[in-house]
Image: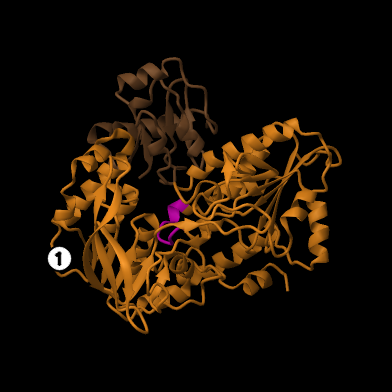
Amino acid sequence: MATTDHSDNTLKIAVVGSGPSGFYAAEALLRADLPVQVDMLERLPTPFGLVRSGVAPDHPKLKEVIKVYDRIARNPEFRFLGNVALGEDLTVDELQANYHAIVLACGAQSDRRMGIPGEDLPGSHTATEFVGWFNGHPDYRDLAFDLDGEVAVIVGQGNVAADVCRILAKPVRELRSTDISEHALEALAQSRIREIHIVGRRGPAQARFTPRELRELGEIPDCVTLANSDDLRLGPHCETEIEDPQNGNAGKNCALFREFAANQTGDARTQVRFHFYRSPSEVLGSNRVTGLRLERNRLDGPAFAQVARPTGETTTLDCDLLFRSIGYKGVPIPGLPFDDVRGIVPNQAGRVAVNDRTVPGVYVTGWLKRGPSGVIGTNRADSVETVKHLLSDLADAPATSKPGHQGLEELLRQRRAEQVSYQQWLQIDEAEVMRGQPRGKPREKFTRVRDMLACAGRK
Amino acid sequence: MPHVVTDNCRLCRFTDCVEVCPVECFHADEEHTYIDPDVCIDCGACIPVCPVRAIYDTEDMPDEFIPWIAINAERAAELPVISAKQPELPTAAERQRELGF
């Protein structure tokens, strides 16, 4: 409510990050039964995190979730401060001095490494880089992917691997009317990639795809999707796993893989092939990637806890381009604890905590809280949980007044930061939509921070 | 095509689905939730969290549930949105057992 008196003990909360988990934290806070102001900090001038830069351009329906975030952002007690980076423009301590609590919602911004020789050869990339590139993320827009070769390998079997595969495999005409960035569209139009291999260390029953995404890989025009029928002879533990009603995706995935195994190569322009029970052991090549050495695995252990054990048998897969999509990690935040193994900020149901000692006033949500699992909506329940604990902690704490956005704005003025408001984002948004129109695209994103700032009337 | 809630939902009201829905597309009466097909974005978050497996992606649904596409559209239009998890119905645990979950 615009009439709230902010000189009193209005709760002032800073949310760091503007992706789904950040917006759902803001929503839960603004729905609380007490006066709350939420300031959302975002290091880019543009909001919405992975909905903007992660969701694939050919999945426009998922991006409709932005309408929900827009509604949250228009709450008078909500402020967006884009182009403000925690750790650069201000510190955790400074935020804590101005707010009753901080909710970290910065996601998992870095990729897990395979930890094998040759991983850094030219031609070996992370899925994050490729996805950021075709989605016009400023950090990745100047990367180059050599699409002159014919064979690409993707290591990892989750939905991000599926996105990478689809964008490589789809005829470019299928992408022209999406919001894919122009530089990526131009490069993909020249692509010679005709064979895409998707490699997983365990079996078809453990692949992490959601069936909807996997099914799509079988429906790409001019493309045949293949699997090896030997890989689909499941052991008893895998059968137990796919028959469990709480593990419905695995059964559906296996049925889809069986359909792929029955496909004939035919004369399709592009081939996608699944490989199971294979771990990469070396990226081959002297000046650039020429292949991947794979070690064959067998599964060991009880149902739902089967691990891949190397058998010692190796094969090589020649390739020109390699992507790894084997998991994501958060990036440590200066001044706060970090769990390097899990790639998250250690927490107890959202309260940042190390060895049972909580860090007062600091909370975490989304991928930075639980690791990179689930889909967009998973973050809503996750943020509801974090905010529930935040509100109950603050209800117990003495009511002191905090400066909130006034303190923050003052700090940013001193630092000559050029923050972007939600209103200014709407200017950028409108300009992007206009830029898309002549090309028949829903938008043509700005891919450089300076262009975004110029559009917002900054600089 | 959207996602739909089917008959297994009846008499439970676990409503875990509601909490993970990113777009608040669930509407409900006293004993059943329904998905508004115009709002659902097909993210699939609700499917695995339903304790009684009542929710299907219409692209991947046994034919017997096809009538539920129309039922969801009609009922969602008449009923209020629910955006937070509700208390379970007293019949929930028994119903879950009965359904074999």
**Front residue of this view, candidates B42 and A38:** A38
Q: Which residues are magenta?
A: A55-62
Across and down, in percent, residue B53 comes to 34, 32
Q: Is residue A167 above or below residue B35?
A: below
Q: Residue furthest right?
A: A7
Q: Secondary structure at mark 1?
A: loop
Q: Circle 1 is placed at which residue position?
A: A265
Q: Relative to residue B87, is residue A408 drawn left or right?
A: right
Q: Amino acid at mark 1?
A: Thr
Disc 1 crowd rating (10 Å Cα; few below 14, some 14-19, many 20+) is few
**Front residue of this view, candidates B36 and A153:** A153
Q: Residue at x 57, y 67 (%)?
A: A432
Q: Is residue A44 above or below residue B41?
A: below
Q: Which chain is brown?
A: B
Across and down, in percent, residue A102 comes to 69, 47
Q: Relative to residue A127, is residue A306 drawn left or right?
A: left
Q: Residue at x 74, y 30 (%)?
A: A396
From where the camera sits, is residue A270 visible? no
Quarter of the figure with residue A220: bottom left
Chain identifier of the residue bearing label 1 in the image: A
Q: Residue at x 62, y 43 (%)?
A: A353
Q: Residue furthest bottom?
A: A287
Q: Is residue B43 above or below residue B7?
A: below
Q: Would you say the magenta stretch is mainly helix, strand or loop?
A: loop
Q: Residue at x 43, y 64 (%)?
A: A113
Q: Quadrant of the N terminus of chain A?
A: top right
Q: Quadrant of the C terminus of chain A?
A: bottom right
**Apparent colour of chain A:** orange
Across and down, in percent, residue A8 comes to 85, 38
